[in-house]
Image (tube, rainbow, N blue to C red):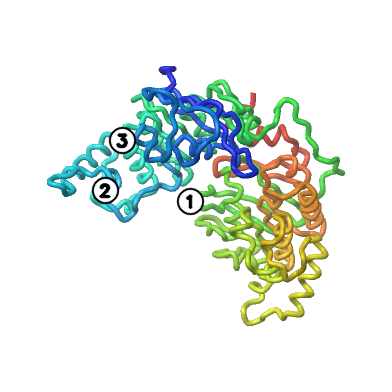
Amino acid sequence: MPEEAVLTMRNITKTFPGVQALSHVDFTLRTGEIHALMGENGAGKSTLIKVLTGVEEFESGEIRLSGVSGTLINHSPQEAQARGISTVYQEVNLCPNLSVAENLYIGREPKRAGLIDWKTMNKKAGELLLSLDIEIDVTKAVENYSIALQQMFAIARAVDMSARVLILDEPTSSLDDNEVGKLFKLMKRLKSEGVGIIFVTHFLEQVYEVCDRITVLRNGSLVGEYKTDSLPRVQLVARMMGKDFDDLAAIRKEKEEAKVLKEVVIEAKGLGRHGTIKPFDLKIHRGEVIGLTGLLGSGRSELARSLYGADKPDSGELLVNGKAVAVKAPLDAMMAGMAYLPENRKEEGIVADLSVRENLILALQAKRGMFHLIGRKEQEALAEEYIRLLQIKTAGMEAPIKSLSGGNQQKVILGRWLLTDPEFLILDEPTRGIDVGTKTEIQKLVVKLAEQGKAVMFISSEVEEMLRTCTRMAVLRDGEKVGELKEHELDQNQIMKAIAGGGRDE
């Protein structure tokens, strides 16, 4: 493979108010290579791409593109595209109601006598797609074709605009294995034609299947650039998570002999949802905290959402206390004794303009139904009890929840679900973005809830937090549950080996 660089980024620094998004980051893309850009949430991947493509300005550093003299600053994605840098996003930016041909040539339609030459445009579109082994009717609207084909159309448009640098941002997240195979075939072909491809993904298997090099970012800084075949998977996981694999020490507190698991509260048999989580089996017992571990995008939240009916499963069955339950919507799950604290509390958790009291009683009111309204006196008594119980710091129960700190908002949402007296709680990143003191309080509360006989599912990106709270862990990788770790197996080395998988533990 030619070693000459098509793109170099040196010392790139970008600051948002209160956040160092990129700190002196270097990145090199060579002609005719597929280069993975890896990192967990908040690592700086998206910011680096936005800086390159002109979506964001950067404070210092330089960008150089082969064939362009001097340093390069793009002021817009259109300017970047004109210079041969094209991006295909996870959410395909096509116009669904327009034809495939119109989408391919939008803004650059062939014209005749000042009018669009439809015949020529359709012919050129068909030939372009055929050159990429895609044979379809280009006069049909884009919405008639699968997401996978829409990804191909977007790539075809970029290629036809003479892209020398092609950025694929999570292009496989909504594709099945067969569709991913077709995309990889196209990527390899473009690579053989000299296109440099930046591949942003969280799927480890895919990185090792198609990528020549890997650049890892963490917390806005460069961890390193590696040849794919010389970086074992477990070492890649360690670099992304910020752990020195060889020197990891389990911080899990000493426990008495393993507890005998109590009766099964929740059992999933072949439960799954096409495109998000592959069919899985899972038993969750009363009095245990089961953790879901895996890298960002491994399927942790998707598994939890399928259990709760937030994303309706399309395969398998769910049993609650041994009885099959049809969970078609969250209300069904709530009535079956389940509760779900979502990862995104601002969008899916709090109702910002309502008071602490109103936010606290929302789930209980939904469970009782609109014909059994909770009286004001009972509302106030319940709010007062849970503000005290969870030590929620607020000016009062009538204060708008948006005036509270993130940690106290999280406590309100937790209180909302505890009010429904659930048997099974799903807590998705319950401590993200909150201070250390509140984080510890929530961890203690999780353990206490299990001791009281509730079953708890706990999802966190922090391994140490999982070790402190969980009695068992299910391991997810690339949208699939690939194993479980029992209490005596819970240490950081075992977890990272399980996450990495793929026989590359050396």
Nearest-to-viewer mark from 2 and 1: 2
Sort mark 2 into few (<14), some (14-19) or many (20+) by Cα contacts within 10 Å.
many
Residue 274, labelled with which disc?
Answer: 1
Is mark 3 in CB contact (under 8 Å) with mark 2? no
- Label 2 is placed on what type of residue? Glu
Residue in the picture at 72% in, 25% down: 246
Nearest-to-viewer mark from 1 and 3: 3
Q: Which residue is mark 2?
A: 102
- Label 3 is placed on what type of residue? Met
Q: Is residue 409 in sight in this rendering?
A: yes
Residue in the picture at 63% in, 67% down: 353
Is mark 1 in CB contact (under 8 Å) with mark 3? no
Residue in the picture at 41% in, 17% down: 2
Q: Which residue is more in the foreground, 179 or 441? A: 441
Residue in the picture at 71% in, 34% down: 494
Residue 328, by quadrant, is: bottom right
- Viewed as shown, does residue 91 lie left or right of 383? left
- Viewed as shown, does residue 250 lie left or right of 59? right
> Percent position (x, y) of residue 28?
49, 24
Q: Which residue is mark 3?
A: 161
> Percent position (x, y) of residue 344?
61, 54
Residue 330, by quadrant, is: bottom right
- Viewed as shown, does residue 19 lie left or right of 202? right
